[in-house]
Amino acid sequence: MTNLDPTGLYEELGAKPVVNAIGSLTLLGGSTPPPEVKEAMDAAESAYVPMTELQERAGAFIAGLVGVPAAYVTSGAGSALTLATAALMAGDDDGKIQQLPDTDGMKDEILIQRRGRYWYDRCLELAGARLVEFGSPDGATADDLARAIGPKTAAVHCLVQEELPDPAALPLEEVLRVAGEAGVPVTVDAAGQIYPLENIGKYVRMGAAFQCVATKYIGAPQSTGLALGTEEMIRKLSLQTFASYEGRRVRGVGRPQKVDRQEVLGAVAAVKRWMSLNHEDRLAGDEQRSRAILDRVAGLPGVDAALIDNVVGHNAFGVRIRADAGVTGVSLPEVVDRLKAGEPPIWTRVRPGEDWMDVHVFGLAPGQEALVADRLARELGG
Ligand SMILES: *Cc1c(COP(=O)(O)O)cnc(C)c1O
């Protein structure tokens, strides 16, 4: 059996390692940094370095790699969202920077489509901003957005998931057009849009002031993320960070969202690797491992399994499983529980509102796909 804890460090703490068949998941630890990233992180320990300078240089380097005017390494994509919102409200005004999260006297409304609300939009509120919805549960029009823009509007925010487009939502192009005419900046959560590569920075090139990227999806420490944007946007965002708090002695809200020098170099190495990786090989590997799981469970009585052939975003390939509990004798949520209770524990999930299970290979160590396939098949009656 695979030994998930060769050094015994997890055991010493009483924390039980698990097999991750869900994908990149913050709750389980994000991703496994490849050797290039670990080497860069180790090398960072050789010296101290002024963090303000390191952040500037790392940002400029990453901006050059992904083709945007400016970039900044943040404490996760979540922090990029918080810092960007703070920057849009306070700008270069040191008084306002130190006043946040009290937004008195500032534009502090972030417009967001009613249908575009999502789990991480909370990160926008943390600097003191208010989310103001436009449109209805059925959709939103350019007029809805134009009418919603007012004297307190600081920005319009959009989540982009190209692999899961919402046909009823107002498209980003329209949001950019209407906001642009009103002189309002647009921020984009593109945390998962790490493939195709052109999507890393594409929304900034389309006219957004800012987009974030979650580097947990490309093998960086999951405590890092990227803010990409215009020169002005990223300069203002940098004024909100822990480095500015210490370096400029101006106390912004970003102080608790620290990034260490190991993490900055790790994020740089991860972006460098990702931009030059052979993605055809990566995707072929993901497809092959997904098929290994599919082949084992497809054809079991009462089980309907299919290959997920999407390559866009952070969850390439995978297997979608539906099961007729009347035939298999077990519901999918029960399968999730049993896999978790087994040895070693295997984490899968059935998301709220869905009656299927998506299994992804992103978080599986080499060879673990066979273990997952076997255990899944056994729980499903095979
Ligand atoms: C993961 C994720 C985030 C949060 O990113 P962190 O780097 O974990 O802070 C935000 N938005 C989306 C769409 C994500 O997938």
Image (cartoon, rainbow, N blue to C red):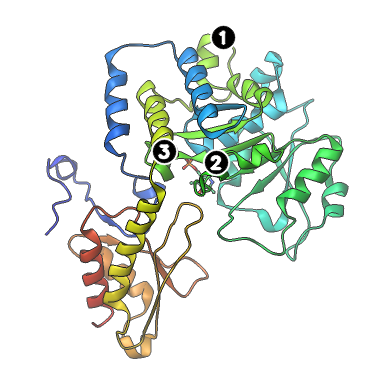
Which residue bears the numbered disc 3?
Answer: 276
Report if residue 101 is visible in the image.
Answer: no
**Amino acid beneath label 2:** Ile
Secondary structure category for the residue under label 3: helix
Neighbourhood count class around disc 2 (C-alpha, 10 Å): few under 14, some 14–19, many 20 upward: many
Residue pointed to by mark 2: 200
Cβ–Cβ below 8 Å for labels 2 and 3? no
Badge 1 is on which residue?
A: 248
From the viewer's side, name the closer residue of 280 and 339.
280
Q: Which mark is residue 291?
A: none
Task: Kindly identify the residue that appears in the image at 78 percent across and 57 percent down.
Answer: 135
- Mark closer to the chain start, 2 or 3: 2
Kind of residue sitting beneath label 1: Arg
Amino acid found under the numbered disc labelled 3: Ser
Instruction: Give me the residue at 39% from left, 55% from top.
Output: 283
Residue 377 picture location, percent across and down? 25, 76
